[in-house]
Image (cartoon, rainbow, N blue to C red):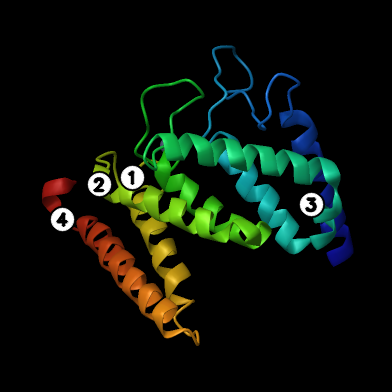
Amino acid sequence: MVEKLHEVISDVAQSIVLNCSHPNYAYMRVIFPISGGGGEAYLGAGHGTVGILYFLMKAIELIPELRLNNQIREKLGHSLGFICKLMEENNGDLPFVEGDTSVARHFCHGAPGTIPMLLQAVETFPDQEAKLVALAQLAGEATWRHGLVLKGNGLCHGIAGNGYVLHILYRFFANRTDCIDLKVKETNEKNANIWRTRAFAFARALYLPEVQ
Ligand SMILES: [Zn+2]
């Protein structure tokens, strides 16, 4: 059963890379919505490149042989590099589409949705750990700086989604407080505290009548 599941996941991953590759673009992209015309090649976690990257890296975590697939490795590397560069140029924010001057503040399109992907990328590209962790924190700062998204409490574009990614940052650093290097331990504890406090502030807002 597990082998069969791995086979299906592997097929899906290869099909994603094939269908999201375009000769004119180095990064993987998909037009959303797919039918009906008027779609855009969004970059975010909900409908675009960041979401594609996250699920491909999750597939690699589950099926390490996929890492040996040259096409997957190459497309992942180029797409991740492209997203990181855009975020660096935008102080941790992510534009809706390539060339856009406006940035989104919610999980599905903006900086918040990049955080789970960037921290997953630490597992896939350990040689880029320092850059990826710094960028995930920069995206967290952007999420915090923009404040509450007043579109309800949902994950996609609401308070819970943005609070959730701040909590993911907390968990990432909290899981790294058990280390021998005292200086690193102290920094990780400090970061864990910052992100925990901020995630909690967002969670509290879910219950405040004045922001609902
Ligand atoms: Zn959304």
In terms of sequence position, does the residue under pointer 1 or pointer 3 come before the other?
Answer: 3
Residue sitting farthest toward the top: 37
**Rendering quarter of residue 156:** top left
The x, y position of residue 58, in whole percent, is: 67, 56
Image mark for residue 6 = none
Is residue 147 something that shows in the picture? no
Amino acid at dot 4: Leu
Q: How many marks?
A: 4
The residue identified by callout 2 is: 145
- Kindly report the distance in space between the C-alpha atoms of the residues bearing marks 2 and 4: 19 Å
In terms of sequence position, does the residue under pointer 2 or pointer 4 come before the other?
Answer: 2
Vertical order, 141 against 27 (above or below) = below
Amino acid at dot 2: Arg
Vertical order, 94 against 211 (above or below) = above
Amino acid at dot 3: Ile
Q: Are marks 1 and 2 in contact (CB under 8 Å)?
A: no
Is residue 32 something that shows in the picture? yes
The x, y position of residue 93, in whole percent, is: 39, 38
Q: Quadrant of the N terminus?
A: bottom right
Mark 3: few/some/many CA within 10 Å (<14, 14-19, 20+)? some
For the point 16% across and 47% down, the residue is 211
Vertical order, 181 against 132 (above or below) = below
Camera-nearest label, 1 or 2: 2
Q: Are marks 1 and 3 in contact (CB under 8 Å)?
A: no
- Depth order, front residue of 35/45: 45
For the point 61% across and 42% down, the residue is 80
In terms of sequence position, does the residue under pointer 1 or pointer 2 come before the other?
Answer: 2
Image mark for residue 158 = 1
- Depth order, front residue of 44/158: 44
In terms of sequence position, does the residue under pointer 4 or pointer 3 come before the other?
Answer: 3
In terms of sequence position, does the residue under pointer 4 or pointer 1 come before the other?
Answer: 1
- Kindly report the distance in space between the C-alpha atoms of the residues bearing marks 1 and 3: 30 Å
